[in-house]
Image (cartoon, grey):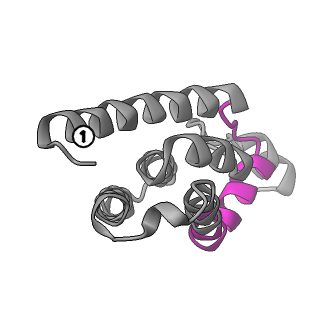
């Protein structure tokens, strides 16, 4: 096969992915659960379903840990509330760079598409709404103060 035939035979990736900046937006708004969703979707697009399951597992575990810290650690209310979103967003961004950064670049360079930033924004807002409902239910039904 000649080089020209190889070039003409090339097909770009068919599945869309989330870019790194989408992770920052969505994770800041929706928390670690949203980061897990985005990571899992990218892993699925990269044909790595085992890693997608791990992303879900660790994001659920991290979310539960944050709930426990927020509700049961004495004196946690003295820490500015913006610190937690900044920290988990930075960690999620680091994980994206470490585990998907090169694949995201290769996907985009090979002609693959990425979802628009507003889609990640909507996912982040949806994640925030879900978290607020869960928090409200915990506070209301378990009488957590």
> In the picture, residue 18 is in which quadrant?
top right
Q: Is residue 107 magenta?
A: yes
Nearest the viewer among 117 and 100 is 117
Q: Say if 86 sits above or below 141 in the image.
A: below
Crowd around label 1: few <14 · some 14–19 · many ≥20 (10 Å):
few
Residue at 57% x, 25% y is 122
Instruction: Specify the quadrant that holds the N terminus.
Output: bottom right
Q: Say if 83 sits above or below 36 in the image.
A: below
Q: Is residue 93 magenta?
A: no
Nearest the viewer among 31 and 69 is 69
> What x and y, as percent, mark residue 38?
50, 46
> What x and y, as percent, mark residue 133?
32, 30
Residue at 28% x, 48% y is 145
Q: Which residue is disc 1 drawn over?
A: 139
Please state the total of marks drawn on the protein image.
Answer: 1
Q: Secondary structure at mark 1?
A: helix
Residue at 67% x, 68% y is 97
Nearest the viewer among 144 and 1 is 144
> In the picture, residue 62 is in which quadrant?
bottom left
Q: Say if 99 sits above or below 1 in the image.
A: below
> What x and y, as percent, mark residue 2?
81, 56
Judged left or right of residue 118, residue 37 is: left
Which residues are the magenta region?
A: 94-115
Judged left or right of residue 46, residue 114 is: right
> What x and y, as percent, mark residue 111?
76, 41
Residue at 35% x, 66% y is 69
């Amino acid at each position: 096969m000649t080089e020209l035939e190889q070039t003409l035979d090339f097909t770009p990736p068919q599945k869309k992915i989330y870019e790194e900046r989408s992770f920052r937006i969505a994770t800041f708004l929706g928390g670690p659960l949203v980061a897990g969703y985005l990571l899992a979707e990218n892993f699925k697009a990269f044909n790595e379903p085992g890693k997608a399951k791990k992303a879900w597992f660790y994001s659920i575990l991290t979310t539960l840990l944050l709930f426990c810290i927020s509700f049961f650690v004495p004196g946690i209310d003295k820490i500015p509330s913006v610190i937690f979103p900044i920290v988990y967003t930075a960690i999620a961004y680091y994980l994206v760079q470490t585990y998907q950064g090169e694949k995201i670049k290769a996907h985009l360079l090979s002609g693959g598409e990425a979802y628009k930033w507003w889609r990640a924004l909507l996912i982040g807002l949806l994640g925030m709404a879900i978290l607020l409902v869960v928090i409200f239910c915990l506070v209301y039904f378990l009488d957590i103060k």
